[in-house]
Amino acid sequence: MRKVVKSDKQPFEIKPQERSIWICMCGLSKNQPFCDGSHKKVTDEEDGKTYEYDAEGHRHEI
């Protein structure tokens, strides 16, 4: 499975279409590569730390 290296706590927006397309940057979306709102789980992550999430959505620092 591909991994996304998180660069921000928000999804990445692509604007050249009639309406915006949001690309997942947190790696948690179940609709990859598109954002499904899963990034809301990562808003309290500490900068400078790396985390992974298990199948149940539990966060672990790595």
Image (cartoon, rainbow, N blue to C red):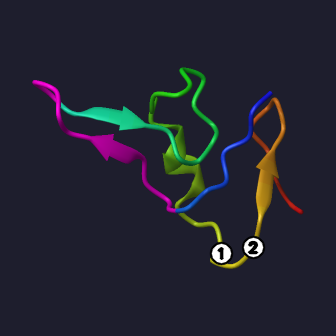
Q: Secondary structure at mark 1?
A: loop
| Residue visible at 82% across and 30% down in the picture | 55
Q: Residues within 10 Å of mark 2 (few under 14, many from 20)?
A: few
Name the residue beneath numbered marker 2: 49
- Amino acid at pointer 2: Lys
User: Where residue 2 appears, x then y in whole percent?
Assistant: 75, 33
The residue under the point 50% across, 59% down is: 9
Majority secondary structure of the magenta segment? loop
User: x, y (%) of residue 58?
Assistant: 79, 45
Q: Is residue 56 left or right of residue 36?
A: right
- Classify 46 as above or below 14: below
Please identify the residue farthest to the top as the structure is shown.
Answer: 31
- Does the magenta segment cover residue 46? no
The C terminus sits in image quarter: bottom right
Residue 33's place in the image compared with 60, above or below, is above
Q: Amino acid at mark 1?
A: Glu
Q: Is residue 14 above or below residue 31?
A: below
* Range drawn in magenta: 8-19
The residue where tag 1 is placed is 46
